[in-house]
Each structure stands twice: as structure tokens, then as C-alpha cells.
Image (cartoon, coloured by chain):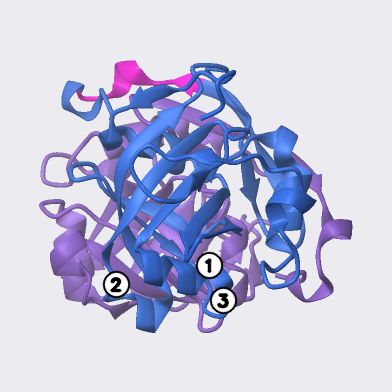
Chain colours: A blue, B purple
Amino acid sequence: MLASERFDSIPVSHARQFLEPGPVVLLTTRHAGRDNVMTVGWHQVLEFTPSIISCVVSRGCRSFDMLRASGQCVLNVPTSDMLDAVVRVGNSSGDEVDKFAAFGLERAQAHDVDAAVLPQCHAHLECRLRDDRAVERYNLFILEVTHISARPSPKEPEYLHYSGDGVFMLSGKRVSRRKLFRPEMLGF
Amino acid sequence: MLASERFDSIPVSHARQFLEPGPVVLLTTRHAGRDNVMTVGWHQVLEFTPSIISCVVSRGCRSFDMLRASGQCVLNVPTSDMLDAVVRVGNSSGDEVDKFAAFGLERAQAHDVDAAVLPQCHAHLECRLRDDRAVERYNLFILEVTHISARPSPKEPEYLHYSGDGVFMLSGKRVSRRKLFRPEMLGF
């Protein structure tokens, strides 16, 4: 991680905090000494403990082959100040351009996996491929989150949520309804 | 649908428009003449055509058994004015309470499947169970969207996005970056 940056470690069982609201993420992979990054909007949480998530990576993308080969990746969660980079990454191919250099994305070493993390992003979910049984049929990778780091602030980051046709929704205000929850439903 | 309500039919390939931004949904099922509803935050898009999505329904919930038995459901997308009902549905069981009556949820007949739609919601994605191979391992249901209806307004609905621990994020403002997209990436 960059020396100037401070990130907190977050329990892996809290992956929902970052993914369940539905932001697009920047997925980084490394294989044979090369890094790649792609924009991913199709992901979900599957389980708290172990911390399991899934995401679709399109066949034909370089990242698809790299994730299959390395079995590792990072889901980096960008904020709205990174909008143009997110769009440009999603509309280019690692075969044609060095997306890190072209779009100003810094890289740092991950904690647990062999892939880049993007320190400009708010959070980084490091993952290992757990189950590839749904890859052939749906391009669906089932991943185990093995480490999470996140900036301690802001408390209410403005993520980017893609709604199709070139339009993004930005995270809005937060509201608590903790008082209406059963106690066992809280804490994660 | 209620006579007083007007809903548009939306191409099923546009399911991403409603699900990809990451809102919680109210999942309705019907089996043996009984309706049920539960709150679901763990879902994603898998494919445009056919229109395939996935969602986790916790084992032990009545909805889990009903979805397995009927093979049909509706994902109803609520807006922020329904926040308290969404939370109360998510913190109660159909074994203990009639959630529709207790939380003021109206019901109407779906277009394609045998399950209730909730006309107070902004959109309704009617689905049929397509693949149950990931149910045993992850409680993950792979569904095909067979019909979508949605209110024509507002154009920028305020959905509810759950971020854990009793806190919701509301959909914020929309921003377009259509000019940065390759033409073949637009239109859906």
C-alpha cells in the first residue's frame, strides 16, 4: 500500500457492507507477471462465514483467463471521483492499452493475494477462487474473501452504481432503522 | 394489477436497469394457495438474453421451500417510502404473521407467473426457476426473468440499498457518461 495512505483491516465477514449496496467494482488480476483491471457490476454476496461472494466476468475478456489461471483477484470499490476512470476501464481492453497508465490508476501490493490493489479506491476485497462449477455455464466465479482493507473515512462514501445505457446512480444519504431490527440481525 | 395503477412492460433483457444498482427487493412466492413475501438483498444479474439473474434465499425461510416447490417468484423493487415495511418484512416470519396484512402490502396478480406482485413497488420482475444446481451448496437460485412491469415515473426512483447493521443507503443522483461508452455498450 502507498506509504501515505492509511487503510483499516475489516473482518472478512463484513464484505456485505461494501458489496450489498451494489456499487460497480474494479476487478484486478495478475498472471504471468502482468496486471489487468476491468469494471464489474454483476456481483453479489453468498455467505458471511466463510465470506463468499460471486461475480460474472465476461468470457473473452483478458481478466476471465487471468482469473481462471491465477485463482486470485481483488475487488476494488471506487468512489464517484473515479467515475471517468471506471467508465474508460469498462470500455477498453487490456489487449490494446495499459489501462493503469492510460487512466491514472496507481497500484500497490495486496495483503493476501498476488494481484494489485488500487489505493485510490475506498475498499479492497482480496479474493481466492473457491468454486468454478458455474463458470462454464454462466461465467460466474464463486470467490472467498480472504482480506478486506478500507479507508477509515469518509463514513458514507459515494459509490458508483450502474443502471445501464451509460448512466450511473451515485450513493445517496444513509438512514438507520436499527430499532426495527431483531437483535440477531444486527452487527454485520 | 390494480385498476388505478399504470405500469409499462419493459423488455426482459433490461433487468439490469432495476437490479444492477443494487436495491433490496421484496421476493414474493405462492404455493398451495398461500402467498409469502421476504426481503432479499443478495442478488445479481448473470445474462441479458436469456434474461438470467440469481439470488440467495436463506434455508429455513418459508420462501425457500415455496420457491423450490413452485419454481416461480416475483422480485418487487420497493422505493424509499416503503422503508419501514421492507424492514418489518425482513424481520418477521410468515410462520408467525400475515406479512401482507400486518405491513400494509397490497397484492395483485402477476402477468406470467403464479405469485403475487406488489403494486406499491416501482417494478416487478417475474421469474421462473431455471437452475437449482447451486441451491444445495449456496442457497443460490438461478432464475430466468420472464416478464417485467414498472411504473413510468418517477424516472429516477429512490431505491433502498442495504449496507448492513440496520442502515440503508438511498439511491442518489444520476449522472450520464454515455459519451465515454463504445456504442455497442449502450442501449441496455
Q: Which residue is depicted at the point 39% across and 71% down?
A: A68
Q: Is residue B99 left or right of residue B137?
A: right
Name the image quarter holding the C terminus of chain A. top left
B133 shown above or below B22: below
Q: Residue furthest right?
A: B179
Residue A9, picture quadrant: top left
Q: Which residue is depicted at the point 81% across and 69% down?
A: B182
| Same chain, labels 1 and 2 | yes
Mark 1 / mark 2, whichever is N-terminal: 1
Residue A132 marker: 2
Residue A110: % across, % down:
43, 40
Q: Mark 1 or 2, which is nearer the eye? A: 1
Q: Name the residue under label 3.
A: B48
Read off the magenta span. A175-182
Check disc 1: other Cα within 10 Å, few if <14, some if 14-19, many if 20+.
many
Check disc 3: other Cα within 10 Å, few if <14, some if 14-19, many if 20+.
some
Check disc 2: other Cα within 10 Å, few if <14, some if 14-19, many if 20+.
some
User: In the image shown, does B41 or A100 lie closer to the viewer?
Assistant: A100
Callout 1, which amino acid? Ser
Give me the chain letter of mark 2. A
User: In the image shown, does B6 or A155 lie closer to the viewer?
Assistant: A155
B72 shown above or below B179: below
Callout 3, which amino acid? Phe
Q: What element carries label 1?
A: helix
Residue A183: % across, % down:
19, 21
Q: Name the residue under label 1.
A: A63
Residue A4 marker: none
